[in-house]
Amino acid sequence: MHTGLIFALLALIPAAIGAAMLFLSGGTPDLITAGLAVAALISMLAGLFILRAQGGHIHRLAQSTGLIAAGKRKEAEPLAKGASPELHQIEQHVRTLAAETDKGKRIFSELVNRFKQHAAKMNELTEKLKRESVLRDYLARYVGNDVIEQMILSQDADPLKNERCEATLLFADIRSFTSMSEGMTPEQVITMLNEYFDAMVGIIFKHGGILDKFVGDELMAVFSPQKDKTAAPLAAVRTGVEMQKKISELMQERNARGLQVFQVGIGINTGNVVVGNVGAKNRMDYTVIGDTVNVAARLEQMAEGQEVIVGEKTYAYCKHAIPMREKGAIKVKNRDEPVKCYEVIVKSATFS
């Protein structure tokens, strides 16, 4: 029975009984008092009956809500059918609220897990960026930014692996450096070399070359093979031409400042080499070795100041694009036949 109807009857029945007794008594005070007492007693008895009938349900509801609040929703038994609709509604509201709370907890837990995963990825990315930054700083001593980008973006797990390939080597050396430096202070020698190397390395990097090493006043650069076989030789020869033109500018500036001037000879050769890490366990150099390297060094020794001398294979790759003339032939150690060489006409060499 609906609780509202019960309470309505509790109010109407005693009132009806009281009114009936008043009507039958003809308004006698004693009977009126007795009628009211009877009505009150009936009302109390009816209320007690209802409380006894719903008390167990209320107790069970209290237990159920306690279990639900403790997160033990599955252990909370539902109210019996005899419970009032209001108690059933209260129970349903509590269960709905608990379900929404559980859903909220699950969503929050998922968000926390996603945040942890995101944080882990961010940490991984940060470490990767740190390693990349260190790698960039290290490689920047040897190669230009374009080459660094290619190495970092390379899908190859070991971009500096040992391999045999065709490459172009460039050697450059200051002429009469030993005798010239004898008349200079150590500070003047170092300042001059740093100024010279800074300009030369910038040009090498500009054309995609890799700085292999400095040996005193000599430098060695490597131009790695490209899909187009003429690309590396052309880049090397253009580097040599631009280096000689830049050296002329530097010497004019040094002469204007009253400083010692010098000339540089450049030798370039193309051929098969072995590229890889060479050295001891605790000290390795990534360099190139082979007969092609020896010939390039020999061509540099042959070159006079302001000259760029190239080997036969380099000439074959570049003759269509850069003006050159035959220089003659040189004898190279461990070779029976002389090596033909060619001089680049630096003043006539123009390119974009």
Image (spheres, helix red, strand yellow):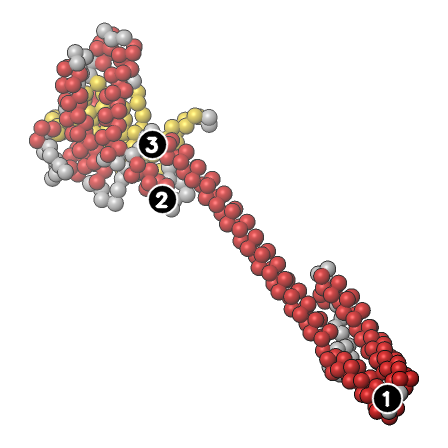
Comparing labels 3 and 1, the label whose residue is closer to the camera: 1
Sequence-wise first label, 1 or 2: 1
Residue at 57%, 52% (x, y): give it: 112
149 and 93: which is toward the camera? 93
Comparing labels 1 and 2, the label whose residue is closer to the camera: 1
168 and 236: which is toward the camera? 236
Cα–Cα span, label 3 and label 1: 117 Å
Residue corresponding to mark 2: 153
Residue corresponding to mark 1: 27
Residue 100 in view, yes or no: yes
Cα–Cα span, label 1 and label 2: 109 Å
Sequence-wise first label, 2 or 3: 3
Element on which disc 1 rests: loop
Q: Is residue 146 left or right of residue 65?
A: left
Residue at 53%, 51% (x, y): give it: 115
Cα–Cα span, label 2 and label 3: 16 Å
Q: Is residue 257 left or right of residue 140?
A: left
Residue at 64%, 62% (x, y): give it: 102
Q: Amino acid at mark 3?
A: Ala
